[in-house]
Amino acid sequence: MQTYLGLDIGTSAVKGVLVDAHQFCLATASSAYSVTHPNAGWAEQDPELWWQAVEKVVAQLRQQAGAAMAKVAGIGLSGQMHGLVVQNRLGGVIRPAILWNDSRASQQCQQLKQHLKNNVATITSIEPMPAFWAAKLLWLKDHEPETLANAHHFLLPKDYVRWRMSGERITDMCDASGTQLLDQARRAWSPEILAVCGVAEHQLPQLAEGSTALATLKPDIAARWGIEWDIENQVPIAAGAGDVAAGALGLGAINEGDAFFTLGTSSQLFIATSGYRPAPEHALHAFAHALPGRWFQMAAMLNGASVLAWAAKLMGVSIDEALAAAENQKSAASSLLFLPYLNGERTPHNNPDARGVLFGLHPSSSVGEVIQAVLEGVGFSLREARNVIEQAGTPITRLTVIGGGSRSDYWLQLLADILERPIMRCEESESGPAFGAARLARLAVTQENPEAVCQPPKIERVFEPSPKKHRHANNFARYKRLYRALEPEFDV
C-alpha cells in the first residue's frame, strides 16, 4: 500500500507525519530547534538546523513504521512563511535566515511605498511589512551590500529543505505570496517589485501550484531514509504550501466560505475564496491558496493564546487555574478592558509599535476579572478580524478552531458569543500543516479531485452563540475607542 510523507518546517521544530492511503496517520515525529535574536527585533535561524531536524524526524518515523516508510510514494512540504535564505553560486548559505517575526526592515517598507508610488498593495494584496522578503531585500541592500552582491539564489525555509532533498529550487504560490514579490492576481513574480528590490527572476525559485511535483527525491537520500527507489519509481516532492494553507488543507478548508481560526502563539482567521479579493486598507492578507485557481483571505494577529499564558504567569497561577478563576466570575462581561497587542499587531492595524493595555483597574479587581478581560481582548481582536473579512466581501457563517487555546470550553463559548458565529472544535486528529502537506503529496501522485482528498475532520463539539451574545457589544465598542485613543502614544 502506498504511503505519503508530510514534513512541516516550523519556527520551533520540524514535524513529520506518515499517512496511508486511507489517510490514517501511521507515525508522527518532531525535532525542535531554537531561534536566535542577535539584536532587538531580529529573529534568525541557521538553515542547517532545519535539515538536521528533518533527518531526525525521518529516522523517528522509520523507527515507528519502517515498512510503511519504504512504500512512500510522494512527499509534501509545508513551512514557516516569509523566511529569507540567501545562497551563493555553489548553494552555500551566506548568512542566517531572516525569519517572519523579524522587524528590522520597518524603514524599508516606506522605501517600497515611495519607489512604487504606493502601488505595492495593488500588486501583492497587502501594504509593505517587515516580515516580507521585499523589505528584507532592501534592508540587505542598505546594510549588507556584500551579502546581496554574492547572492545567487533566494529560498523560503521549506524550499531550502526541498533543495537539499532534490537539488531543485521550487516554491508554491502560497509561500511565494508571503514574499511580497508575487503578483497575486497573475500568480507570477512581479517585474516591478523585483526591479525595486534589485533582484532578477532567475535568482528566485520556480513557481508551481502546491499539488504539482516538479522535483524528485535524490536516490542516495531515499536509500538513507529507507524509501524504495528506482529509476522507474522515483519519489515526487509536491510543491507544498506555507503552513497556514497546508493547515487549511488538513482541515478541508479549500472551498468558498470554508473558515477557521487558530488559537496558538499567534492567531489567524482564515477563509477560502474562489477569487482574488484584496483588502489592504484593513491589513488583510489575500494570498494564493495551495490549490490551483483558489485564494484565501487571512487576518493575521500576532497575539493569541500566548497572551493568556503571559497573564497567568504574571498572576502567579497556572493556565488552568487562570481559566477557572475567570469562569468562576460568572459575570456577563468584564468591567475591565484589555488590548492584547503584546507583540504589536498586523490585522487590522498594521502597527508593530502597538502594545498591551489593561484598563479600568480598581481596588477590588481580582485574578478572575483580569483573566476574563484578557480572554475577551483576544476575542475582540478576532471580532475585528471577522469584521474586516466580511467587509471585504466574504461572509463567515461558522468557524472551526484549532490550536492549544481550543481546549477550553469556557473560552470557546466566550468567543462564540463575541464573534456571534458557531464555533466547531474537531475531534483529536492530525490536522496540522504536516498532514496537509501529506495530502498535497497524495494529490501530486494520484491527481485525484481535491474535494475527495481534503475532507474535514469530524466535529467533536459545536459552541453556539448564546441568546445574550450582544452583552459584549458595549465592551467591543469601548475596546475600539481605547485603541484609537492610545494609538498616538505607542509610537515613542
Image (cartoon, helix red, strand yellow):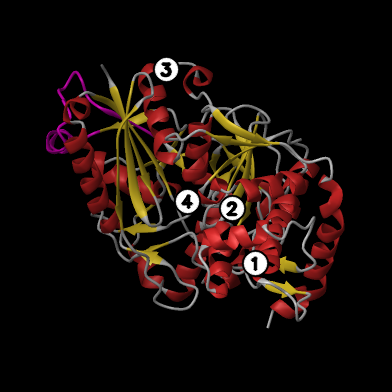
Up-down relation of residue 464 to residue 372 (above or below): above
If you read the primary sequence from the N terminus, does the residue marked by circle 1 or circle 4 appear first? 4
Up-down relation of residue 368 to residue 5 (above or below): below
Gap in angstroms between the C-alphas marked 4 and 3: 26 Å
Secondary element at tag 2: strand
Quickly name the residue at label 1: 341
**Amino acid type indicated by mark 4:** Met
Quarter of the figure with the C terminus? bottom right
**Amino acid type indicated by mark 2:** Ser
**Range of residues picked out in magenta:** 217-238
The image position of residue 485, as x and y in percent, is 82, 73
Q: Nearer the viewer, mark 1 or mark 4?
A: 1
| Residue at image location 81% in from the left, 45% down from the top | 469
Quickly name the residue at label 2: 267
Look at the image and tell me whether residue 173 can be seen: no
Quickly name the residue at label 4: 81
Secondary element at tag 1: loop
Quickly name the residue at label 3: 447
119 within the magenta span: no
| Residue at image location 52% in from the left, 32% down from the top | 251
